[in-house]
Image: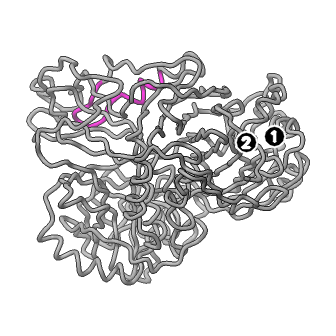
């Protein structure tokens, strides 16, 4: 038997300069609400000003701005599991999360591959109107679509400390010791949880948009509820992305809205749509409305083909193990784990109850969970891949493999408002694919003559559910493959962020590579040089499975000259020249910059927030250890064997690779 108890939590953000709400505090939760498994989530703490009469009755100002809360609820026959994560725009300083938990609760951090796989499988894709190329008149025909959201990797904040305190007073005392102040509304909320303990994780937040690690909470009570009653938006609306794993399609109670596809427009100049603005409008009123963006079995395990060129969306199982293997430096075989899990989930076999790792411990107890495989049940080990990638086994515990569906709902908490408690119901409704077809071509950005040859848009095929299978014309399927920046010269040996995507043909005989690297040399020539490279598994990993010698963040600078990639934000190089004319600064390795607001190299003084930081201090390294708002930071370093592989494979790949089209990725931008 599993020795776990119920867990309850909530999500709040406390920011500098805020004061208690003028309206009365929410009443204490009912016993039914307290019984919720993982009832949602995380309270964010930050330095909170004690100056009197500032922002009294307001929660609109502060240094930590919550942007998106991600929640996954998995409903089994005898337990519920919750995963939660917060995306927040922050300035440098301390940040903590507090999770209320009853004695006996089992807690874990999940690998980033888990939520990334959920996003890849369910993020909305927007196609141009039927019969329209999706490009401006006179431009070459291009099979384009918009991916709403971001599917590339961002390292979550590493926790500096994890501790458990006995009560709300203990949280306040701990916060005082670390220069943090808990606001009165949060104290009231914590005090209402009689008999709970409080798990606190402390972080050192940098400047910019960051992610907290994904926290997993497991309880053996069945609680079909999306718990958002204490979620609060501050100076901007808060986006809620809520996934559920159930036996069949999931529905939320309350107002279920639909996207007005007759108003969905596709911008031929940018390749983007007005999907996000339409979604925000529909979710803003009435409060608590939800939009079903995806629900199907294929989203969990399988592949969805869509569009005339047969684009491909991988299910969670494939992406999860693929990325988990990458983040663990090849310590596990992602392909083998994918094949084994897909075979297990293809049968009408009940999965035996699985035990979570409980790496963060059992509150006020010890881990006494043991797995018992009854006759006719599948072993949960068939859904695990190494010691860290166990989320699939936990999520599907007790479910019949062939019945499990993944659903995604979008919700919206308006500025200054709080969240709600939403009941989850499993239904027999039809599948909803994350593909929409626009009905209106937008040629306003195409320049002169743009109002002409866009073709007719009859609106046929516009749907809130999109296609359910391949609508290709018989050609090979295509997939988007990310191209990462890698600098193998000037002593840097750094892997940066995704520069763009390439669309390549794929088949069973010749599958597409998982990713490419684009090598940059000291001349800055990066044209036509990308190559697929796979990690050799030689890197040492930390508790999350990342290489410990890497640093946190986005894309590094190149090592000289001009670059053919114009999509970068800061465009730094060793000569101070960049082809990105939209950049706010042109920094070089000597600390020289054309921006008169300030210049510094990596060893210089960066106390002035307006200064531009260069990419080295003349030591031949091209990597910057510092990163400011809007700048992309270094990704984990390559091992020596991988660097050698790149230098060998690049010339070969230049001669043999298939032609493909670049696609720029979207990148999160700080908000102020």
Question: Which quadrant of the figure has residue 232?
Answer: top right
Give the labeled residue for mark 2. Answer: 14
The residue under the point 56% across, 40% down is 68
Q: Earlier in the sequence, mark 2 or mark 1?
A: 2
Whole-Å distance between the Cαs marked 2 and 1? 7 Å
Residue 611 at least partly seen:
no
The residue under the point 66% across, 32% down is 228
Q: Are marks 2 and 1 in contact (CB under 8 Å)?
A: yes
In the figure, 192 relative to 375: above or below? Answer: above
Q: Mark on residue 183?
A: 1
Question: Which quadrant of the figure has residue 135?
Answer: top left
Residue 511 at least partly seen:
yes
**Circle 1 SS class:** loop
Q: Residues within 10 Å of mark 2 (few under 14, many from 20)?
A: many
Residue 261's spot in the image, x, y percent?
A: 33, 20
> In this view of the protein, which residue sits in the foreground, 603 or 557?
557
């Amino acid at each position: 038997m599993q020795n776990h108890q119920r867990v309850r939590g909530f999500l709040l953000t406390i920011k500098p300069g805020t004061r208690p709400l003028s309206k009365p505090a929410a009443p204490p939760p009912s016993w039914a609400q307290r019984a919720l498994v993982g009832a949602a989530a995380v309270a964010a703490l930050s330095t909170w000003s004690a100056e009197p009469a500032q922002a009294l009755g307001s929660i609109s100002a502060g240094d930590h701005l919550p942007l998106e809360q991600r929640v996954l609820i998995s409903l089994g026959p005898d337990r519920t599991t919750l995963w939660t994560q917060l995306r927040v725009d922050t300035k440098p300083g301390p940040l903590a999360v507090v999770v209320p938990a009853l004695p006996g609760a089992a807690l874990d951090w999940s690998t980033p591959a888990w939520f990334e796989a959920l996003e890849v499988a369910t993020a909305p894709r927007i196609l141009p109107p039927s019969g329209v190329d999706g490009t401006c008149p006179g431009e070459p025909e291009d099979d384009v679509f918009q991916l709403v959201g971001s599917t590339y990797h961002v390292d979550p904040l590493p926790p500096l400390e994890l501790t458990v305190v006995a009560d709300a007073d203990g949280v306040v005392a701990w916060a005082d010791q670390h220069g943090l102040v808990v606001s009165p509304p949060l104290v009231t909320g914590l005090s209402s949880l009689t008999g709970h303990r409080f798990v606190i994780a402390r972080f050192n937040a940098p400047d910019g948009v960051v992610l907290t690690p994904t926290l997993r909470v497991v309880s053996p009570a069945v609680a079909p509820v999306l718990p958002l009653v204490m979620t609060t938006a501050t100076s901007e609306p808060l986006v809620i992305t809520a996934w559920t794993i159930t036996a069949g399609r999931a529905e939320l109670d309350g107002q279920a809205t639909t996207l007005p596809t007759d108003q969905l427009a596709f911008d031929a100049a940018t390749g983007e749509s007005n999907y996000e603005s339409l979604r925000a409008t529909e979710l803003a009123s009435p409060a608590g409305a939800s939009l079903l963006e995806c629900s199907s079995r294929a989203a969990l395990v399988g592949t969805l083909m869509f569009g005339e060129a047969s684009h491909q969306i991988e299910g969670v199982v494939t992406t999860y193990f693929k990325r988990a293997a990458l983040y663990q430096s090849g310590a596990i075989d992602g392909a083998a784990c994918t094949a084994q899990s897909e075979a297990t989930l293809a049968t009408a076999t009940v999965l035996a109850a699985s035990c979570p790792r409980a790496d963060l411990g059992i509150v006020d107890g010890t881990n006494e969970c043991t797995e018992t495989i009854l006759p006719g049940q599948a072993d949960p080990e068939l859904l695990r891949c190494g010691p860290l990638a166990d989320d699939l086994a936990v999520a599907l515990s007790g479910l019949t493999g062939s019945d499990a569906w993944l659903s995604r709902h979008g919700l919206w908490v308006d500025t200054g408002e709080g969240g709600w408690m939403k009941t989850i119901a499993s239904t027999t409704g039809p599948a909803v694919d994350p593909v929409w077809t626009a009905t209106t071509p937008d040629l306003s950005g195409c320049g002169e003559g743009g109002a002409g040859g866009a073709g007719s848009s009859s609106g046929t095929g516009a749907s809130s559910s999109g296609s359910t299978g391949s609508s290709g014309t018989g050609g090979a399927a295509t997939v988007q493959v990310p191209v990462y920046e890698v600098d193998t010269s000037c002593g840097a040996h750094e892997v940066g962020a995704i520069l763009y995507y390439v669309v390549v043909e794929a088949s069973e005989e010749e599958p597409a590579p998982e990713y490419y690297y684009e090598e940059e040399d000291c001349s800055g020539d990066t044209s036509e040089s990308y190559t697929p490279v796979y990690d050799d598994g030689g890197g040492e990993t930390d508790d999350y499975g990342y290489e410990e010698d890497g640093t946190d963040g986005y894309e590094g600078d190149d090592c000289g000259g001009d670059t053919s990639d114009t999509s970068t934000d800061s465009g730094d190089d060793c000569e101070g020249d960049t082809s990105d004319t939209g950049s706010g600064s042109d920094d070089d390795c000597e600390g020289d910059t054309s921006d008169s607001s300030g210049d510094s190299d990596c060893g210089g003084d960066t106390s002035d927030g307006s200064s531009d930081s260069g990419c080295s201090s003349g030591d031949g390294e091209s990597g910057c250890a510092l990163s400011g708002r809007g700048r992309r930071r270094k990704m984990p370093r390559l091992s020596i064997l991988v660097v050698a592989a790149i230098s060998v494979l690049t010339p070969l790949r230049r001669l043999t690779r298939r032609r493909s089209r670049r696609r720029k990725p979207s990148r999160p931008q700080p908000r102020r």
